Image (cartoon, grey):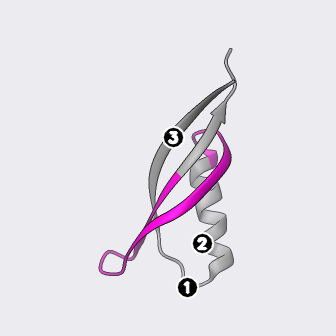
Amino acid sequence: MTTHFITVEVNLQKNILKLHEEIEAELGKRGEPLRWSITEVDTKKQTVHIEGIITNSSN
């Protein structure tokens, strides 16, 4: 198993539950999220920047 530090950008959602789901889905495309945090909110572009740690299985 390997860990990776990644950054992603997702669309800002008015509903906090939908925002959480979108963040988890985007991180899940790259691996299993261990932890993540919102590091920036861009209100002009309506996006949020996420930094996270994910794991991937080594084959």
- Mark 1 or 3, nearer chain start: 3
Disc number placed over residue 5 in the picture, else none: 3
Please tell me how crowded label 2 is: few (under 14), some (14-19), or many (20+) other residues with Cα within 10 Å. Answer: some
Secondary structure of the residue carrying tag 2 is: helix
* Horizontal side of residue 47 vs 17, given as left or right: left
Disc number placed over residue 39 in the picture, else none: none
Please tell me how crowded label 1 is: few (under 14), some (14-19), or many (20+) other residues with Cα within 10 Å. Answer: few
Give the image location of residue 8, x and y in percent: 45, 53
Q: Exactly how many numbered labels are in the figure?
A: 3
Q: Residue at x 53, y 78 (%)?
A: 13
Classify the position of the N terminus by image quarter: top right
Disc number placed over residue 19 in the picture, else none: 2
Q: Residue furthest left?
A: 44
Q: Quadrant of residue 14?
A: bottom right
Q: What are the residue bounds of the magenta stretch?
A: 28-51
Q: What is the C-alpha distance between the residues marked 2 and 1?
A: 8 Å
* Horizontal side of residue 14 vs 10, given as left or right: right
Q: Which residue is mark 1?
A: 14
Q: Quadrant of residue 22?
A: bottom right
Say if the magenta span includes residue 47: yes
User: Type of residue at label 3?
Assistant: Phe
* Horizontal side of residue 37 vs 21, given as left or right: left
